[in-house]
Image (tube, helix red, strand yellow):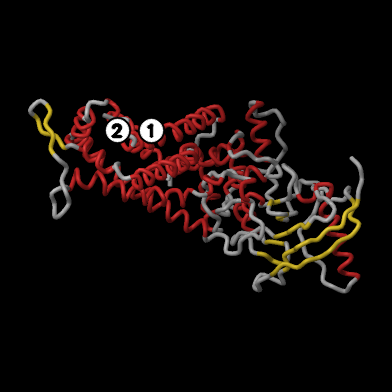
Amino acid sequence: MALTGVSLIAFLVVHAGLNACIWANDNGEMFNKAAHFMGSTVVIRIAEVGLFIGIILHIVQGLMLEFENRSKRTIGYQVPLGNRGSKWYSRSMGLLGTLILLFLIMHIYHFWTPSRLGGIGNIHSLQPVEYNGKEYHNLYAEMITVFQSLLIVILYVLGCISLAYHLMHGFRSSFRTLGLHNERYYKIVSATGVAFSIIVPFVFAMMPISIYLGWIQ
Amino acid sequence: MEHYTMNLTLKVWKQKNKDVRGSFETYRVKDISSEMSFLEMFDVLNEQLVHEGKEPIAFDHDCREGICGMCSMYINGRPHGPWHGTTTCQLHMRAFKDGDTIVVEPWRANSFAVIKDLIVDRGAFDRIIQAGGFISVNTGNAQDGNNIPIEKEKADQAFAAAACIGCGACVAACKNSSAMLFVSAKVSHLALLPQGAPEKRTRVLNMIAQMDKEGFGACTNTGACEAVCPKEISLENIARLNKEYLGAAATIDK
């Protein structure tokens, strides 16, 4: 859980950084070029396979862990300990993870499928766009189209909130699992984790919001 | 603190033996002194039950001074009751008010089968200790106390981990019924000391293997165990256990 979790955390940094190019206000040129670089570089394509393996392992392991742990107490308590011993999100990693998975299915369908599999069968392709005589996929235009719907924007923001709470526990917990017992380092990791869990999902959530509210030209 | 007496309603789990499903029974106790311990209140109730010709409530207890790890009541949703860093026997009735209803349950975990009423079988902990929670020494003359120099800070950390009394509150509080805090305390207090070093790798691997065999859940670092531990064993020990385990698994010879 911890190893796959940490690698997914690393992916989030790349993903958030690259997508922040939409705020360049250049009608998506910088973003489309960056997305093209990611899609056409062999190293990134190999890393993409690793990412999918990582996500699938994280999901399968997570579900197995959740079900196994739940089976360890057949008769529950009349009065639960609840928030007196731990945070609600620490106890709800399975639920939060499932919400993120549902979000991810929608998210992959929105952007990954047309950009990678567009044109196969009846999957629609992305529009072409030309910069300096070279043709690129206009993923930026796809974002603008998708985020015109208020419902989708709300679902994306909810996905980001689930991610924030998932990270709030997951970030520090993964370091504990990997054996970080030095209290000073743990405090640093813990504080970094809290900052990361707030900043990264906030950056993600601001993307559909900015597009929907027309803050991006 | 001013002394007062109270009347209480108790909802206590009654279960005949391992094989039948139990249920809650309601009892009323009167004129309980605020200076009594929680177990003394149970003694009063049991005497009352004996006088009425009813069966007393079975519960675990031994030293009644907070060091043996026998008492094991889950009081109002918290192992060992509402006070922080306190065992049930050291919990005093001044923690409650007149007219309170107190729900008392046994530790709940499939690895801790209820033997009767509030008594659970914690033999799993004994078997984990037998798997490696010791150092092998040749008997003979006792060594000089200062023969092996030990850094003060390490000695303190080892002592803090060794304070674990093996009561099982960590398992009772954990949503996964994980025994990691217990195992980590037992592994840590030896791993931190030079005497524990020669067997550190086999110890951690064998104890974890036994822990899994006993059917305890996996740790997800929620911290509920640390919050309820009467001996305030730190979650840091679990991270140390993970480090010891990863190191041992990667470098063991067999």
Marks 1 and 2, the one that precedes in the sequence:
2
**Residue nearer the viewer, B92 or A196:** A196
**Residue nearer the viewer, B193 or B125:** B125
**Residue nearer the viewer, B77 or B36:** B77
Count the marks.
Answer: 2
Query: Residue at image x 31%, y 49%?
Result: A106
Horizontal and vertical percent for residue B194?
60, 33
Q: Amino acid at mark 1?
A: Val
Vertical placement of A213 versus B69: above or below?
A: above
Horizontal relation, residue B224 to residue A27: left or right: right
Q: Amino acid at mark 2?
A: Asn
The image quadrant that residue B238 belongs to is top right
Query: Residue at image x 88%, y 69%?
Result: B50
The CA distance from mark 1 to mark 2 is 9 Å
Query: Residue at image x 83%, y 48%?
Result: B92
What subunit carries mark 2?
Answer: A
Horizontal and vertical percent for residue B21?
65, 71
- Marks 1 and 2 on same chain: yes
Q: Residue furthest left?
A: A133
Decide if residue B136 is in sight here.
no
The circle drawn on residue B224 is: none
> Callout 2: helix, strand or loop?
helix
Tell me the residue that label 2 is attached to.
Answer: A19
> Callout 1: helix, strand or loop?
helix
Q: Are marks 1 and 2 in contact (CB under 8 Å)?
A: yes
